Amino acid sequence: DAGITQSPRHKVTETGTPVTLRCHQTENHRYMYWYRQDPGHGLRLIHYSYGVKDTDKGEVSDGYSVSRSKTEDFLLTLESATSSQTSVYFCAIMASGSTDTQYFGPGTRLTVL
Amino acid sequence: GENVEQHPSTLSVQEGDSAVIKCTYSDSASNYFPWYKQELGKGPQLIIDIRSNVGEKKDQRIAVTLNKTAKHFSLHITETQPEDSAVYFCAASKSSAGNKLTFGGGTRVLVKP
């Protein structure tokens, strides 16, 4: 699992509440990614980071923000959760020394009621 | 942006038979094509990948082929076993600008004993 942990693993929240998901890695990888997985859509990129305080948007970034204040942590925040953000969220890293290989964490299942 | 189509969405095979999953991509600049296997409740696991300077790659019972002219690539699993039952995803990316993966919709493979 490339030393990736995600927390929490499961969360149920209500519409309109803020939610923060955490991705933690132990191997000093520079690149980190957040994807969401929904039936029939595969995985879609939300945001990614190419270094501390360096982030960029992905395909489905609306309603999400990210922060990376330390190499090992990449946070995904839903400022005001909506039911359409019910999904499984995966963090990934790009292996150091590689130009492309990504490894995924175990995922966080988020339900917004 | 890139668009990846994956077929079939479900595939049922008898143990010992071969399974083939096909993907097409739209961006001719894409140069990296990984395949992931996802078991229930887990994150996607990289099983094989191919780069655009290679036409075919094998790893034991798994092989991937790439046709850059037609912009399609395929996963071949030979001598299928029950433990091959899972959801498989293809993806495509360019090895630049953060290597953002675009995924296909997934194929659920069931290997019947």
Image (cartoon, grey):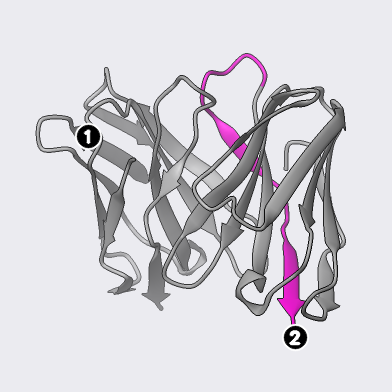
Q: Amino acid at mark 1?
A: Leu
**Could you tell me residue A31's position as x and y percent?**
67, 27
Q: Is residue A113 left or right of residue B40?
A: right
**Could you tell me residue B40's position as x and y percent?**
61, 70
Distance in Å between CA atoms under marks 1 and 2: 43 Å
**Could you tell me residue B111's position as x and y percent?**
39, 73
| Mark 2 residue element | loop
Quadrant housing residue B106: bottom left
Query: Is residue A107 at all visible to an observer of this figure?
Result: yes
Query: Is residue B42 at all visible to an observer of this figure?
Result: no
Q: Is residue B73 left or right of residue B41?
A: left
How packed mark 2 is, by other alpha carbons closer than 10 Å (few <14, some 14-19, many 20 or more), is some
Q: Quadrant of the C terminus of chain A?
A: bottom right
**Could you tell me residue A104's position as x and y percent?**
65, 45
* Closer to us: A3 or B3: B3
Return the residue at label 2: A113
In the orientation shown, which residue stands out farthest toward the top?
A97
Q: Amino acid at mark 2?
A: Leu
Subunit that carries the residue with mark 2:
A
How packed mark 1 is, by other alpha carbons closer than 10 Å (few <14, some 14-19, many 20 or more), is many
**Magenta stretch contains residue B109:** no
Q: Is residue B98 left or right of residue A72?
A: left
- Residue at the spot x=40%, y=44% of the render? B91
Return the residue at label 1: B66
- Residue at the spot x=47%, y=69% of the render? B82
Q: Nearer the viewer, mark 1 or mark 2?
A: 2
